[in-house]
Image (cartoon, rainbow, N blue to C red):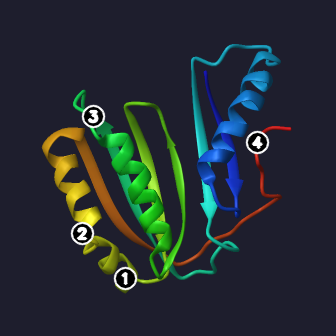
Amino acid sequence: MYLCALCASSEAGGEAISQRFRPRAKAYLSSLPFSPKKIAIMITHWKGDPPTAPYYAVIFISQKSEQLEGYAEADAEMMSEAQKQEGYLGYSSSGEPKQGIFISYWQDQESIQKWRAHSGHIQAKQNGKQSWYNYYHSIIAKVERSVIHGEWLEGIQ
């Protein structure tokens, strides 16, 4: 049995939300009448209010290698730099330590191209190809419709 726990925020510091969420998720899981074999936590973080379509999603599906020297530092730096870019709207992320899906949201294709040309991002992509990833698949998609239902969650209450 699988369980997907959701977490969303429009405040800065999506990773801090993830850290606050995990203890509540564990408490919730211990109250269930079954034991899930796997837990997927989905985090969504918007720079401001959720955007109105159309906008773009860059979907990055990956499986990491065993060669992760410098990865954590570069990942944190790229998250920080991406959020400073004009046209950056937010992100969603779900995964496990060795594999996952990361989706960044952008106002337009021009914003995506500027991010692709960022020198730090170019270097991170080179390192990813050379050592950090066994596999990845990058997809750029136009979001033509987006519907949000319910309250923004910061974890299971």
Tag shown at residue 109: 1
The residue depicted at 65 percent of the width and 46 percent of the height is 16
Q: Is residue 61 above or below residue 95?
A: below
Indicate which disc, 3 or 4, sits on the residue closer to the N terminus: 3
- Separation of marks 1 and 3 at Cα, in angstroms: 30 Å
List x then y, in percent, for residue 85: 45, 76
Question: At numbered mark 3, what does the secondary structure look like: helix, strand or loop?
Answer: loop
Of the residues tagged 3 and 4, which is closer to the observer? 3
- Separation of marks 4 and 1 at Cα, in angstroms: 32 Å
Q: Amino acid at mark 2?
A: Ser
Tag shown at residue 18: none
- Separation of marks 4 and 2 at Cα, in angstroms: 35 Å
Tag shown at residue 68: 3
Say which of 64 and 15 sits in front: 15
Of the residues tagged 2 and 1, which is closer to the observer? 2
Indicate which disc, 3 or 2, sits on the residue closer to the N terminus: 3
Of the residues tagged 1 and 3, which is closer to the observer? 3
Q: Amino acid at mark 4?
A: Gly
Crowding at dot 4, Cα within 10 Å, few <14 / some 14-19 / many 20+, comes out as many
Tell whether label 2 touches label 4 (CB within 8 Å): no
The residue depicted at 47 percent of the width and 82 percent of the height is 86
Question: At numbered mark 1, what does the secondary structure look like: helix, strand or loop?
Answer: helix
Indicate which disc, 4 or 2, sits on the residue closer to the N terminus: 2
Say which of 80 and 145 sits in front: 80
List x then y, in percent, for residue 131: 17, 39
Question: At numbered mark 2, what does the secondary structure look like: helix, strand or loop?
Answer: helix
- Separation of marks 3 and 2 at Cα, in angstroms: 20 Å
Q: Amino acid at mark 3?
A: Leu
Residue 133 in view of the camera = no
Tag shown at residue 155: 4
